[in-house]
Amino acid sequence: MIKDIRVSRIFNSRGEETLRVYVETNKGVFFSDCPSGKSRGSAEPVVKSFEEIISFFTEFRKNLIGFEEEDFSSLDEFVEQFAGERFSRIGGNLAIALSQAVVKAASEGGVYEFLRPGAFVFPYPLGNVIGGGRHGGFTDIQEFLVVPVEAENIREAIETNFSIWRDVKQIAEKKGLYFGRNDEGAVMFKGDHTAVLKVLSRVCEEYGARPGIDVAATTLFRDGKYVYEKEGFSLTPGEQLDFMVELSEVYGLVYIEDPFHEEDFSSFSELRRKVRSLVCGDDLFVSSPERLEVGNTMKSASAVLVKPNQAGTVSRALRTVELARRSKMYVVVSHRSGETCDSFISDFSVGVGAELIKCGITGGERVAKLNRLIEIWEEVSRTRVPRMARIKG
Ligand code: PGA
Ligand code: ZN
């Protein structure tokens, strides 16, 4: 039974203020942190400052004492109703940190095991090797990613991503094109998208991995056009579609995230019909079951990004996964660019049997998630034979 709940003002990997929630039960004290994004969808939950949360927390807290942690879905339901549209009454940051802490409290044997006992399928780590856009870098495309599709276990998969990241960094350094690491630890490579994709696809080939991209196109969309400001060109929506098809074909992309702005469900559908790459919606769906339903009727995407803090509660994130499964979509569990060392998403990804997990490659807050995956793999191995998910495309 939940006996007490406390909030604490902590910091994320960017040094910005964020929130930790402590939940005390008869079994002990459990906590979880809220991450923060920089390329946020406009339909995401509202974020409240610590001062705002403190102003109503004492009263709000009284409603939660006495809930049974095992029945986290009832608590989530109460919070969702209380919080209202986009969690505007209490903030999605409070809601998700609370929900995750309660799930941790409920799951003595690990969150992955609690969410789905017997879970043994592992996601491929979708690693961010070269960065741009708002996260820092020289391209307007936000992320140049890799999927180690030939790796046979999680450690090998993580190691492959590290090797690719290291090789790309070395190539950049040798050519005098290395500008450091960005918000997610990705290399800031002094070059345009063509230069970057050429290097990345060559290194990928050496390691049996496949490249992908997150365009985060909402951040580029201005007055009806996609403005590639850093690289100095603009595209109409039609040209953007052709551009995506070309990148997919030339570089054999396995994954394309947010190729169009957050309201353009129909261009997503068109691209999906034209390419072999997985087409994934991030800002398009904002991990919301309601928006995913709209996308499904239009067959907008073959994959959905699930960021628990976009969903607002663990139960809501699970509903999004459930809907995705019904329409045979891939599930990609994801971190945010501003992170803490909380590794809840690693457990969540195994628990829901996600095909991919996007949690970066380097930096303590990213490595915490990767190492947790290794820990879970080793735990599962004691009783079963774990395996990697199957990726097509
Ligand atoms: P964000 O970006 O966490 O900065 O919003 C991540 C993404 O677009 O996938
Ligand atoms: Zn994204």
Image (cartoon, helix red, strand yellow):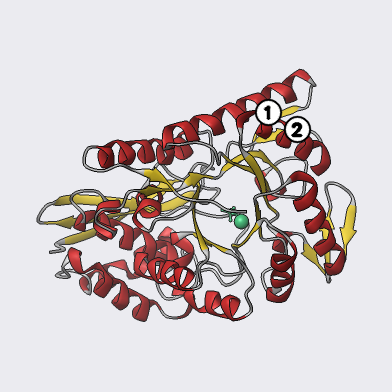
On the question of residue 381 being in view, the answer is yes
Image x and y of residue 299, in percent = 62, 75
Give the left or right position of residue 6, taking residue 132 as reference.
left
Residue 286 position by quadrant = bottom right
| Image: 21 above or below 285 | above
Label 2, secondary structure: give it: helix
Image x and y of residue 267, in percent = 74, 71
Front residue of 187 and 65: 187
Q: Of the two numbered discs 2 and 1 on the same chain, state the one appearing first in sequence.
A: 1
The amino acid type found where label 1 is placed reads Val
Crowd tier of the residue under label 1, counting other residues whose Cα lies within 10 Å: few below 14, some 14–19, many 20 or above: many
* Disc 1 target residue: 168
Are the two marked residues, 2 and 1, in contact with CB atoms closer than 8 angstroms?
A: yes
The amino acid type found where label 2 is placed reads Val
* Disc 2 target residue: 199
Label 1, secondary structure: give it: helix
* Quadrant into which the C terminus falls: bottom right
Image x and y of residue 117, in percent = 24, 56
* Quadrant into which the N terminus falls: bottom left
Q: Residue furthest left?
A: 26
